[in-house]
Image: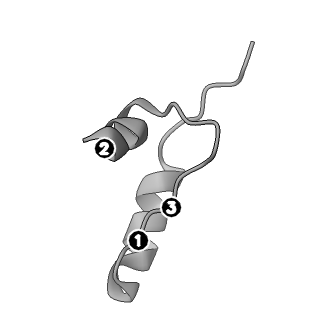
Amino acid sequence: MGGYLVVYMGSTAFGIELHVPESQLEKAQELINSVPIAEDE
């Protein structure tokens, strides 16, 4: 469950790897790129 929360909540100092089937790569990239990233203040 810890890995799920890191993806969901977005808190990690080390980055994260997501593995998707090659046939779903384009859709996964679209989903990731559609999420706005909050700038550090």
Check the picture and name the quadrant holding the N terminus: top left
Q: Is residue 22 above or below residue 6?
A: below
Q: CA distance from mark 2 to mark 1?
A: 13 Å
Residue 17: image tag: 3
Name which of mark 2 and mark 3 comes first in the sequence: 2
At label 2, counting other C-alpha atoms closer than 10 Å, the crowd grade (few under 14, some 14-19, many 20 or more) is few
Q: CA distance from mark 3 to mark 1?
A: 7 Å
CB under 8 Å between discs 3 and 1: yes
Image label count = 3
Helix, strand or loop under label 3? loop
Amino acid at dot 2: Tyr
Q: Which residue is mark 2?
A: 4
Residue 11: horizontal and vertical position, in percent? 51, 30
Quarter of image, res 8:
top left
Helix, strand or loop under label 1? loop
Residue lying furthest right: 41
Quarter of image, res 26:
bottom left
CB under 8 Å between discs 2 and 1: no
Q: Which residue is mark 1?
A: 19
- Residue name at image x 63 percent, y 45 percent: 14
